[in-house]
Image (cartoon, rainbow, N blue to C red):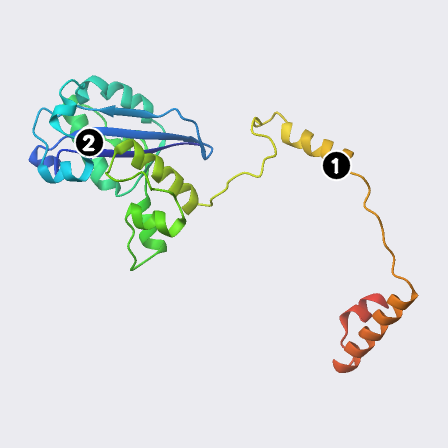
Amino acid sequence: MRQIVLDTETTGLDPAEGHRIIEIGCVELINRRLTRNNFHQYLQPDREIDEGAVEVHGITNELLRDKPRFADIAGDLVGYIRGAELIIHNAPFDVGFLDHELRLWREDAEPVENLCRITDTLVMARSRHPGQRNSLDALCRRYGVDNSQRDLHGALLDAEILADLYLAMTGGQVSLSLFTQDAPGTGLVAEGLRRLVAQRRPLPVVRADGDELAAHNARLAAIDEASGGQCLWLKIWTR
């Protein structure tokens, strides 16, 4: 199972007004494990960034002057996300911008929903926590995910935080494997368990003495009397 946790930063709020993507951050999960095969790119938008957007993410036009344009990395990005499940917080925003950029790149470019399955963690959070704040920061507090480095928004940092948050929201720890290098079909975990069982010493058996048995029987008799003859242990014992 390959999942890509994705986030973008943009010049503004609406691609219909000509706003563009200026940062893409992607974190790869395979079988719910971080692979560190991430995709991260700053982009030259060929337009000014809104002041309100700069206040959110801190990315300036000066920072982006020597960065590639979306068309320069579009093929690599499509190849990276194709066939994966995209995990996005407030997916319509990011997908809307990605589709806009893909259409500018190539008129016949497939929309993101044709390339990937999309899971929106904001929709997921709203269904689980109705009436509560479900921003990324609020969810981090709720699920105990560390976002202390998040002074400003950043696509890669937010994708990394969202990956941790998604794993916490959908089950937390996902494997009790005793070995980190096991692979499907290798039998490493099963073999390791067999070795542990073989090496374990037999557990000692401590039997009750006469006084302990007498006290036990007296307690059962008291329970049976108080329950009107319904002491289950006596019924099982005397079968």
Q: Nearer the viewer, mark 1 or mark 2?
A: 1
In the picture, measured across the screen, residue 228 lies left or right of residue 43, that is right
> From what the image shows, is residue 14 above or below residue 68?
below
Q: Residue 175 sits in which quadrant?
A: top right
Residue at screen point 50% across, 42% down: 173
Are dots 1 and 2 in contact, CB under 8 Å? no
Q: Residue 194 sits in which quadrant?
A: top right
In the picture, measured across the screen, residue 29 lies left or right of residue 53, that is right
Residue 225 placement (x, y as % from top left): 79, 81
- Give me the C-alpha separation between circle 1 and circle 2: 55 Å
Residue at screen point 92% across, 66% down: 210
Residue 52 placement (x, y as % from top left): 11, 40
> From what the image shows, is residue 181 above or below residue 167?
above
Q: Residues within 10 Å of mark 2 (few under 14, many from 20)?
A: some
Residue at screen point 64% across, 27% down: 188
Viewer-proximal residue, 234 or 192?
192
In the picture, measured across the screen, residue 33 lies left or right of residue 222, that is left
Residue at screen point 59% across, 35% down: 177
> Which disc is residue 227 wearing?
none
Q: Residue 239 sits in which quadrant?
A: bottom right
Is residue 185 among the parts visible in the rendering? Answer: yes
> From what the image shows, is residue 141 above or below residue 40?
below
| Mark 1 residue type | Val
Q: Earlier in the sequence, mark 1 or mark 2?
A: 2
Residue 68 placement (x, y as % from top left): 18, 18
| Mark 2 residue type | Asp
The residue to which callout 2 is attached is: 99
Name the image quarter holding the N terminus: top left
Q: SS of the residue at dot 2?
A: helix
> Which disc is residue 197 wearing?
1
**Residue farthest toward the right in the current orientation of the protein:** 210
